[in-house]
Image: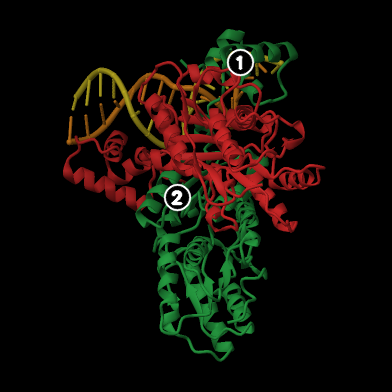
Chain colours: A green, B red, C orange, D yellow
DNA sequence: TTGAAAGCGCTACCAA
DNA sequence: TTGGTAGCGCTTTCAA
């Protein structure tokens, strides 16, 4: 059996409470007693039980839940890393789950995390309704929404400037002479997709260019579907001369497709989300960049402030993006 | 306050035990009682407390610990994804931590996970001694080591065929006429580095080529240091005509460095670890590939078998690699 | 079908 | 400086 404090107490010939004091480094234990207790702890291989501690202390666990679309997507993996870095000093752990944009799965994941009494929740939401988290929030579990806002719930939210980033991207392409710029985007219902679409439109309007529905391909939930979308775009009677890709998965798919079809004149391109190998491709990929690790850090910092008692109204932060010209976005039509 | 079963019982005018039965879907509750309890649960926003459950049942938690070098590294992120997929149906969660190859941090992370009574541990070890996990293992927490074996501990281990993969890579380069093949590897003490170095040597020996210490650069713990290493290699009196890169981070660094120096004749290259954009680079990168998601799945499957009572002796599995020729490894000297 | 009581491992409170 | 006791929220055991 796993040794308990009682076992340690017996082995060290002291009371349970004394063991507790040693384990928790309370100072009111004499040197010899402390040593013999520590010896007993080592001998038995005792480790304190967080379940019992959390239960007794009536507090939440040493875990923060992180719910995203896919932990293996570089964007979310970087987010996880940022969160971890930020809470490391507090000895908090990050429990991460993937939804694959499945609302059911998201809800199951969040419910499970709540049952586990996580100390906080960081959510890149996918479902249409997060009101079921209201009670949790009211009971003191900090919840921060990242990259997308919650629906039917008032909670802290950290977003990326989707509209501005997309507008900049498309204006950049237009400035280089393009008049037919395509947009390949994620699922139509996703917040970031909509924001980036709006930025795309705004850029066209500001440039006096028509909005052509034919040039917009939404619903690309993975790189495979993005591949199909760009192939289809290229087969139009009047194909685009430039493309704005809506996220890192889509960019991958589009790049793969473009590498597959030998084009006489390469399609100009600006991609949302930076990626490590972007400077190494031919041509190097111009991107709308932001810092996902920093995004995770900020979200975690917000959680920590709430844990520390900040009970102010929900905050909404929007972090800026910046365009990094590398070549693919500077080619003319 | 957070509602408990007692609160629900009071609200529904039944006993605590009846609520427990409803919550746990035991069948011995009458229809009306069940309904009124469920109503009370909804009204109060009750959620059962996993801490109390695990404590009372004397079992481990619904979490598996995953300790790697860096959750944001694509290899480990994919590993995490595989684990998650495999245990999803059991309603297990994955709590992931990064060590950055710091033994202290690794130990702190593992101790914390043990205190949290995780249901199992998946570890890509970095420290020189994991004997401190022996008691945990003996007490019934399954532990699986992934990608690297443990030191001073007998436990399940899943490895990649480092020696074979590296040998194949270098033989491939030699078969294309190279006689000076460099190896840029990770920290010298790391298991995978050593195995891949051995494969490198074996290939040279089998080809009747000399082992030239000058062509081996270990200690590249990130892409930055790999960049420096390859630059240095190129400045040799007789520089290599080909390079074998030891992992995905190193490959990134080497590629970046090579893009920086315009070379008259490109350096041939085979990389350990496949990566999404490898086919899109110029030239496309020949890799020694394996499936990290599947590796994670396998490791998780092993954990699950142990959780299900398999008490056999520790197993050691080695998964094969396969060479994917894409262009960078087929250029002559 | 329902309920009462004991106790999981721990910390808080009070007493010595 | 030390120890006893109560009780966190739940499941288990036994009884009605």
User: Is the residue B255 above or below the residue A200 in the image?
Assistant: above
Res. A167 in view? yes
Q: CA distance from mark 2 to mark 1?
A: 38 Å
Q: Which residue is mark 2?
A: A98
Instruction: Kindly identify which chain the residue marked by label 2 belongs to.
Output: A
Labelled disc at residue A41? 1
Among the two numbered marks 2 and 1 on one chain, the one whose residue lies closer to the N terminus? 1
A175 relative position to B262: left or right: left
Mark 2 neighbour class, 10 Å CA radius: few under 14, some 14 to 19, many 20 or more: many
Where is residue B99 drawn, in percent x and y? 64, 36
Residue depth check, mark 2 versus mark 1: number of the one nearer the observer: 2
Where is residue A295 drawn, in percent x and y? 62, 57
Pointers 2 and 1 within a single chain? yes
A225 or A156, which is in the foreground?
A225
Q: Residue at x 52, y 17 (%)?
A: B154
User: Is the residue B104 above or below the residue B268 in the image?
Assistant: above
Asked if the residue under mark 1 is in contact with the one under mark 2, i.e. CB atoms within 8 Å, the reply is no
* Extreme residue toward the bottom, this view: A208
């Amino acid at each position: 059996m796993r040794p308990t404090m009682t076992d340690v107490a017996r082995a060290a010939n002291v009371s349970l409470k004394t063991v507790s004091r040693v384990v928790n480094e309370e100072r009111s234990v004499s040197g010899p007693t402390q040593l013999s207790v520590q010896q007993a702890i080592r001998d038995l291989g005792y480790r304190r039980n967080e379940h019992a501690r959390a239960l007794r202390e009536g507090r939440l666990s040493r875990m923060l839940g992180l719910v995203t679309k896919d932990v293996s997507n570089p964007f979310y993996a970087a987010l996880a890393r940022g969160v971890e870095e930020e809470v490391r000093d507090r000895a908090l752990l990050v429990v991460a789950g993937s939804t694959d944009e499945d609302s059911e799965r998201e809800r199951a994941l969040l419910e499970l995390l709540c049952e586990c009494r996580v100390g906080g929740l960081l959510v890149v939401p996918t479902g249409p309704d997060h009101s079921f988290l209201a009670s949790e929030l009211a009971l003191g579990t900090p919840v921060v929404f990242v990259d997308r806002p919650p629906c039917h719930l008032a909670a802290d939210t950290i977003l990326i400037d989707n509209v501005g980033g997309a507008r900049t991207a498309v204006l950049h392409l237009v400035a280089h002479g393009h008049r037919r710029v395509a947009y390949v985007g994620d699922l139509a219902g996703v917040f970031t997709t909509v924001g980036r679409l709006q930025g795309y439109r705004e850029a066209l309007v500001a440039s006096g260019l028509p909005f052509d529905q034919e040039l917009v391909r939404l619903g690309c939930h993975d790189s495979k579907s993005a591949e199909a979308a760009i192939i289809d775009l290229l087969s139009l009677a009047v194909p685009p001369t430039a493309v704005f890709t809506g996220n890192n998965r889509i960019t991958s798919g589009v790049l793969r497709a473009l590498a597959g079809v030998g084009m006489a004149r390469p399609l100009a391109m600006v991609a949302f989300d930076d990626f490590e190998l972007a400077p190494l491709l031919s041509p190097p990929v111009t991107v709308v960049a932001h810092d996902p690790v920093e995004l995770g850090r900020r979200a975690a910092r917000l959680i920590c402030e709430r844990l520390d008692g900040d009970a102010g109204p929900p905050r909404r932060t929007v972090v800026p993006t910046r365009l990094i010209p590398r070549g693919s976005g500077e080619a003319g039509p």
